[in-house]
Image: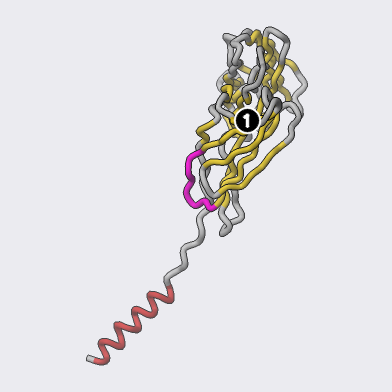
Protein backbone atom coordinates (compact mmCIF):
# COMPACT_ATOMS: atom_id res chain seq x y z
CA UNK A 1 0.00 0.00 0.00
CA UNK A 2 2.81 2.38 0.90
CA UNK A 3 4.46 1.62 -2.44
CA UNK A 4 1.30 2.54 -4.34
CA UNK A 5 1.03 5.82 -2.44
CA UNK A 6 4.71 6.54 -3.14
CA UNK A 7 4.26 5.90 -6.89
CA UNK A 8 1.15 8.08 -7.05
CA UNK A 9 2.92 10.88 -5.21
CA UNK A 10 5.90 10.61 -7.55
CA UNK A 11 3.67 10.97 -10.63
CA UNK A 12 1.99 13.98 -9.04
CA UNK A 13 5.31 15.69 -8.37
CA UNK A 14 6.52 14.95 -11.91
CA UNK A 15 3.29 16.40 -13.38
CA UNK A 16 3.61 19.55 -11.30
CA UNK A 17 7.28 19.90 -12.17
CA UNK A 18 6.64 19.51 -15.90
CA UNK A 19 3.67 21.84 -15.99
CA UNK A 20 4.72 25.03 -17.70
CA UNK A 21 3.84 28.39 -16.33
CA UNK A 22 1.44 30.16 -18.66
CA UNK A 23 3.17 33.08 -20.33
CA UNK A 24 1.66 36.54 -20.09
CA UNK A 25 -0.58 37.47 -23.02
CA UNK A 26 -0.20 40.72 -24.95
CA UNK A 27 -2.99 43.29 -24.51
CA UNK A 28 -5.82 43.62 -27.00
CA UNK A 29 -7.08 46.77 -28.69
CA UNK A 30 -9.99 48.77 -27.32
CA UNK A 31 -12.96 50.03 -29.29
CA UNK A 32 -13.42 53.79 -29.18
CA UNK A 33 -16.83 55.09 -28.07
CA UNK A 34 -16.82 58.86 -27.51
CA UNK A 35 -16.23 61.47 -28.91
CA UNK A 36 -17.65 59.79 -31.98
CA UNK A 37 -15.77 59.55 -35.26
CA UNK A 38 -16.05 62.61 -37.54
CA UNK A 39 -18.39 64.48 -35.21
CA UNK A 40 -18.63 67.72 -33.27
CA UNK A 41 -18.28 67.15 -29.53
CA UNK A 42 -20.71 69.48 -27.77
CA UNK A 43 -20.67 67.92 -24.29
CA UNK A 44 -17.43 69.42 -22.97
CA UNK A 45 -17.42 71.27 -19.66
CA UNK A 46 -16.49 74.89 -20.38
CA UNK A 47 -13.28 76.10 -18.71
CA UNK A 48 -13.58 79.64 -20.03
CA UNK A 49 -13.61 81.24 -23.46
CA UNK A 50 -10.77 79.18 -24.93
CA UNK A 51 -10.99 75.67 -23.49
CA UNK A 52 -13.39 72.97 -22.36
CA UNK A 53 -12.85 69.67 -20.60
CA UNK A 54 -13.81 66.68 -22.73
CA UNK A 55 -14.45 63.17 -21.48
CA UNK A 56 -13.23 60.25 -23.60
CA UNK A 57 -14.73 56.77 -23.39
CA UNK A 58 -13.70 53.36 -24.78
CA UNK A 59 -14.36 49.67 -24.16
CA UNK A 60 -12.31 47.46 -21.86
CA UNK A 61 -9.64 45.28 -23.49
CA UNK A 62 -8.47 41.83 -22.41
CA UNK A 63 -5.00 41.39 -20.90
CA UNK A 64 -4.75 45.13 -20.28
CA UNK A 65 -3.62 46.83 -17.07
CA UNK A 66 -3.58 50.44 -18.23
CA UNK A 67 -4.84 52.59 -21.10
CA UNK A 68 -2.86 55.48 -22.58
CA UNK A 69 -5.10 58.11 -24.16
CA UNK A 70 -3.37 60.19 -26.87
CA UNK A 71 -5.13 63.27 -28.22
CA UNK A 72 -3.60 65.35 -31.03
CA UNK A 73 -4.52 68.88 -32.08
CA UNK A 74 -4.61 68.43 -35.86
CA UNK A 75 -3.66 72.03 -36.63
CA UNK A 76 -0.69 72.33 -34.25
CA UNK A 77 0.19 68.62 -33.91
CA UNK A 78 0.38 69.14 -30.14
CA UNK A 79 -0.13 65.81 -28.37
CA UNK A 80 -1.65 65.34 -24.91
CA UNK A 81 -1.41 61.98 -23.15
CA UNK A 82 -2.92 60.60 -19.97
CA UNK A 83 -2.82 57.08 -18.51
CA UNK A 84 -5.87 55.52 -16.88
CA UNK A 85 -6.75 52.17 -15.36
CA UNK A 86 -10.38 52.85 -16.25
CA UNK A 87 -12.16 53.09 -19.60
CA UNK A 88 -12.50 56.85 -19.51
CA UNK A 89 -10.38 59.95 -19.02
CA UNK A 90 -10.76 63.72 -19.37
CA UNK A 91 -8.50 66.34 -20.94
CA UNK A 92 -8.75 70.12 -21.43
CA UNK A 93 -8.97 70.98 -25.14
CA UNK A 94 -9.10 74.18 -27.13
CA UNK A 95 -12.56 75.09 -28.36
CA UNK A 96 -13.28 75.02 -32.08
CA UNK A 97 -10.28 72.86 -32.96
CA UNK A 98 -10.08 69.55 -34.78
CA UNK A 99 -8.56 66.64 -32.85
CA UNK A 100 -7.60 63.05 -33.48
CA UNK A 101 -7.44 60.47 -30.70
CA UNK A 102 -6.50 56.89 -29.96
CA UNK A 103 -6.05 54.61 -26.95
CA UNK A 104 -3.03 52.39 -26.43
CA UNK A 105 -3.44 49.20 -24.34
CA UNK A 106 -0.59 48.26 -21.99
CA UNK A 107 0.39 45.33 -19.79
CA UNK A 108 3.47 45.51 -17.53
CA UNK A 109 4.10 41.77 -18.04
CA UNK A 110 4.86 42.14 -21.75
CA UNK A 111 6.65 44.67 -23.94
CA UNK A 112 4.01 44.74 -26.65
CA UNK A 113 1.43 47.50 -26.75
CA UNK A 114 -1.48 47.79 -29.16
CA UNK A 115 -3.33 50.84 -30.40
CA UNK A 116 -6.97 51.37 -31.26
CA UNK A 117 -8.25 52.97 -34.43
CA UNK A 118 -7.69 56.71 -34.81
CA UNK A 119 -10.83 58.86 -34.65
CA UNK A 120 -11.29 62.54 -35.48
CA UNK A 121 -13.66 65.15 -34.06
CA UNK A 122 -14.13 68.88 -33.52
CA UNK A 123 -14.32 70.27 -30.01
CA UNK A 124 -17.32 72.59 -30.08
CA UNK A 125 -16.59 76.30 -30.18
CA UNK A 126 -17.82 79.33 -32.06
CA UNK A 127 -17.16 77.75 -35.48
CA UNK A 128 -19.54 78.61 -38.28
CA UNK A 129 -17.65 76.51 -40.84
CA UNK A 130 -15.47 73.41 -40.56
CA UNK A 131 -12.58 72.00 -42.55
CA UNK A 132 -13.21 68.44 -43.78
CA UNK A 133 -12.04 65.49 -41.72
CA UNK A 134 -9.08 63.50 -43.11
CA UNK A 135 -10.13 60.75 -45.50
CA UNK A 136 -10.40 57.27 -43.99
CA UNK A 137 -8.49 54.77 -46.11
CA UNK A 138 -10.53 51.64 -46.85
CA UNK A 139 -8.17 49.66 -49.06
CA UNK A 140 -5.42 48.80 -49.45
CA UNK A 141 -4.70 49.30 -45.77
CA UNK A 142 -1.25 50.43 -44.72
CA UNK A 143 1.51 47.85 -45.26
CA UNK A 144 -0.97 45.42 -46.85
CA UNK A 145 0.18 42.87 -49.44
CA UNK A 146 -2.13 42.84 -52.46
CA UNK A 147 -2.50 41.12 -55.82
CA UNK A 148 -3.04 43.04 -59.04
CA UNK A 149 -5.93 42.09 -61.32
CA UNK A 150 -5.65 40.75 -64.87
CA UNK A 151 -5.25 44.32 -66.13
CA UNK A 152 -2.30 44.94 -63.78
CA UNK A 153 -4.41 47.29 -61.66
CA UNK A 154 -5.29 47.76 -57.99
CA UNK A 155 -8.31 49.64 -56.63
CA UNK A 156 -7.68 52.44 -54.12
CA UNK A 157 -10.72 53.34 -52.02
CA UNK A 158 -11.54 55.69 -49.14
CA UNK A 159 -14.37 57.50 -47.36
CA UNK A 160 -14.57 61.11 -46.22
CA UNK A 161 -16.76 63.34 -44.07
CA UNK A 162 -17.35 67.06 -43.55
CA UNK A 163 -19.64 68.61 -40.94
CA UNK A 164 -20.63 71.27 -43.50
CA UNK A 165 -21.27 68.60 -46.13
CA UNK A 166 -19.50 70.74 -48.74
CA UNK A 167 -16.69 68.53 -50.05
CA UNK A 168 -15.98 69.51 -53.67
CA UNK A 169 -13.23 67.11 -54.71
CA UNK A 170 -10.53 64.64 -53.79
CA UNK A 171 -6.91 64.80 -54.89
CA UNK A 172 -5.24 61.39 -55.07
CA UNK A 173 -1.44 61.23 -54.85
CA UNK A 174 0.30 57.99 -55.81
CA UNK A 175 3.91 56.98 -56.51
CA UNK A 176 6.74 54.58 -55.64
CA UNK A 177 8.34 57.31 -53.52
CA UNK A 178 7.38 58.76 -50.17
CA UNK A 179 5.88 61.20 -49.72
CA UNK A 180 3.87 60.62 -52.90
CA UNK A 181 4.00 63.83 -54.93
CA UNK A 182 2.36 62.69 -58.17
CA UNK A 183 -1.22 63.98 -58.40
CA UNK A 184 -2.79 61.25 -60.50
CA UNK A 185 -6.42 62.35 -60.36
CA UNK A 186 -8.78 65.03 -59.05
CA UNK A 187 -12.18 63.47 -58.41
CA UNK A 188 -15.72 64.64 -57.70
CA UNK A 189 -17.04 63.97 -54.16
CA UNK A 190 -19.33 61.23 -55.47
CA UNK A 191 -16.29 59.16 -56.48
CA UNK A 192 -14.28 57.55 -53.70
CA UNK A 193 -12.27 54.89 -55.51
CA UNK A 194 -9.84 54.73 -58.39
CA UNK A 195 -7.90 52.07 -60.30
CA UNK A 196 -4.14 52.49 -60.62
CA UNK A 197 -1.63 50.61 -62.74
CA UNK A 198 0.94 48.65 -60.74
CA UNK A 199 3.84 46.23 -61.14
CA UNK A 200 4.60 43.09 -59.16
CA UNK A 201 7.08 43.08 -56.28
CA UNK A 202 6.78 46.85 -55.85
CA UNK A 203 5.87 49.05 -52.89
CA UNK A 204 3.57 52.00 -53.57
CA UNK A 205 2.68 55.05 -51.46
CA UNK A 206 -0.55 57.02 -51.65
CA UNK A 207 -2.62 59.67 -49.91
CA UNK A 208 -5.92 61.47 -50.39
CA UNK A 209 -6.47 65.20 -49.90
CA UNK A 210 -10.05 66.28 -49.21
CA UNK A 211 -11.04 69.81 -50.31
CA UNK A 212 -14.23 71.67 -49.39
CA UNK A 213 -16.07 74.58 -51.01
CA UNK A 214 -14.10 77.16 -49.03
CA UNK A 215 -10.75 75.72 -50.05
CA UNK A 216 -10.06 74.01 -46.72
CA UNK A 217 -7.96 70.86 -47.09
CA UNK A 218 -7.22 67.77 -45.04
CA UNK A 219 -4.72 65.02 -45.77
CA UNK A 220 -5.28 61.34 -45.04
CA UNK A 221 -1.60 60.81 -44.28
CA UNK A 222 0.64 58.44 -46.20
CA UNK A 223 -0.35 54.80 -46.74
CA UNK A 224 1.66 52.08 -48.44
CA UNK A 225 1.09 48.64 -49.88
CA UNK A 226 3.12 46.01 -51.70
CA UNK A 227 2.02 44.32 -54.92
CA UNK A 228 2.90 40.62 -54.84
Image coordinates of residue 206 in percent, x first then y, are: 68, 25
Question: What residue is drawn where x is 49% and y is 52%?
Answer: 63
Question: What residue is drawn where x is 76% and y is 29%?
Answer: 76
Q: Quick one: which residue is furthest to the bottom in this view?
A: 2
| Total labels drawn | 1
* Residue 204 seen in the figure: no
Magenta run includes residue 2: no
Question: What residue is drawn where x is 69% and y is 39%?
Answer: 80
* Residue 128 seen in the figure: yes
Viewer-proximal residue, 31 or 179?
31
| Disc 1: which residue | 227
User: Mainly helix, strand or loop, the magenta region?
Assistant: loop
Q: Quick one: which residue is furthest to the left in this view?
A: 1
Here the colouring is: secondary structure
Image coordinates of residue 14 in percent, x first then y, are: 39, 78
Magenta run includes residue 59: yes
Question: Is 136 situated left or right of 12 in this image?
Answer: right
Image coordinates of residue 219 in percent, x first then y, are: 70, 22
Q: Which residues are magenta?
A: 58-65
**Quadrant in which the N terminus is drawn:** bottom left
Viewer-proximal residue, 188 or 106?
106
Mark 1 nearby-residue class (10 Å; few <14, some 14–19, many ≥20): some
User: Against 43, is 170 above or below?
Assistant: above
Where residue 37 sits, quadrant-wise, is top right
Question: Is 6 situated left or right of 182 in this image?
Answer: left
Where residue 78 sits, quadrant-wise, is top right
Amino acid sequence: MMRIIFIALSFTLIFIGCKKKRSAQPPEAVMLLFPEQNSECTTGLSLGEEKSQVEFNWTAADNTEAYELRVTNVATQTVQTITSSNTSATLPLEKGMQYSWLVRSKNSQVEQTVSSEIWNFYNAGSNTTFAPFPATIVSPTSSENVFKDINNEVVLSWTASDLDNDIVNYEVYFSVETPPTDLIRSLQPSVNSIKVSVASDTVYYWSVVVIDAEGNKSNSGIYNFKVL
